């Protein structure tokens, strides 16, 4: 039990450290870029792309910038410049500053954090480090909810990533899928609807619910599909594809 507790604490500690460091290679590359950081900062800060007055995408609330707004703008601008070039090792030190000191600045900070740490997870040379990076971007997702809400949307994406990187965690996956749909209702993401339906279909097969109960789920998914088609959702065809699969299952059950 003590050994298990120690291992668990070690993983948590490692995840926290990964929010502040991305390995020796990244540290070396960041050090190499130090000489050009000032000139890059001047170039980026003078660019229209980061003009706070022109863009107005960074909120007007000074509290969003943290204790040192000038440093936050510089760090944000540098991280965005490197990130757009996919120079993630260079972007991360500046991203971490924004993440730690101005966590409510912009939602795209969290999109970028997940992408960069997922990239590191894919490139990790051993499974322990791979899973540590996965834990880290899940922590970034949770921080996003804390500052920007949208728990249902985030849970859907966490479920999708969990299935990809930890397919054995089926119970947690089902929990996140179900909670996401419960919160989002008609605005549920298309990719959680099929696993949501499958949870109930499996219950029917295990004789823990009746067919009428499953048909209620079918009707709910039909409502979600109709809602997204009527609102011209860009993924409307994905919703229709899920609806078709659900209807086919119900039709086969009725035929039997």
Image (spheres, grey):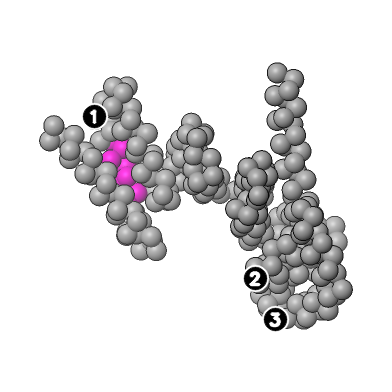
Report the magenta residues as a range: 216-225
- State how far apart marks 1 and 3 are (Cα): 59 Å
When asked about the image quadrant of residue 102, the answer is bottom right
Q: Please say whether residue 158 is visible from this viewpoint.
A: yes
Our reading of the magenta stretch's main secondary structure is: helix
Neighbours of disc 2 within 10 Å: few (<14), some (14-19), many (20+) = few
**Residue 218 lies in the magenta-colored region:** yes
Q: In this view, which residue lies farthest toward the top?
A: 1
Neighbours of disc 3 within 10 Å: few (<14), some (14-19), many (20+) = few
Q: Give the residue drawn at x 49%, y 43%.
A: 163
Residue placed under numbered mark 1 in the picture: 211
Residue 232 in the image: state x and y as whole percent. Answer: 35, 63
Q: Give the residue drawn at x 12%, y 35%.
A: 255
Marking on residue 84 = 2
**Residue 196 lies in the magenta-colored region:** no
Mark 2, mark 3: which one is toward the viewer? 2
Residue placed under numbered mark 3 in the picture: 48
Q: Is residue 148 above or below residue 81?
A: above
Q: Earlier in the sequence, mark 1 or mark 3?
A: 3
């Amino acid at each position: 039990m003590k050994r298990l507790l120690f291992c668990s604490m070690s993983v948590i500690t490692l995840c926290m450290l990964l929010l502040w460091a991305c390995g020796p290679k990244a540290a070396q590359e960041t050090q190499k870029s130090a000489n050009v950081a000032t000139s890059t900062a001047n170039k980026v800060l003078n660019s229209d792309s980061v003009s706070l007055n022109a863009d107005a995408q960074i909120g007007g609330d000074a509290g969003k910038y943290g204790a040192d707004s000038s440093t936050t703008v510089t760090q944000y601008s540098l991280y965005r410049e490197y990130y757009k070039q996919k120079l993630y090792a260079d972007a991360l030190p500046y991203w971490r500053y924004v993440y730690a000191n101005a966590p409510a600045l912009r939602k795209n900070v969290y999109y970028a954090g997940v992408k960069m740490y997922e990239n590191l997870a894919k490139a990790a040379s051993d499974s322990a480090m791979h899973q540590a990076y996965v834990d880290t971007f899940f922590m970034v997702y949770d921080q996003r909810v804390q500052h920007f809400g949208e728990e249902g949307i985030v849970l859907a994406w966490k479920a999708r990533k969990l299935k990809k990187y930890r397919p054995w965690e089926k119970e947690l996956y089902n929990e996140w899928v179900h909670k996401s749909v419960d919160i989002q209702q008609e605005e549920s993401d298309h990719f959680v609807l099929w696993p949501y339906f499958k949870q109930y279909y499996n219950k029917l097969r295990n004789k823990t619910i009746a067919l009428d109960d499953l048909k209620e789920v079918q009707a709910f998914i039909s409502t979600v599909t109709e809602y997204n088609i009527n609102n011209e959702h860009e993924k409307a065809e994905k919703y229709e594809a899920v609806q078709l699969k659900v209807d086919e299952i119900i039709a086969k059950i009725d035929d039997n």
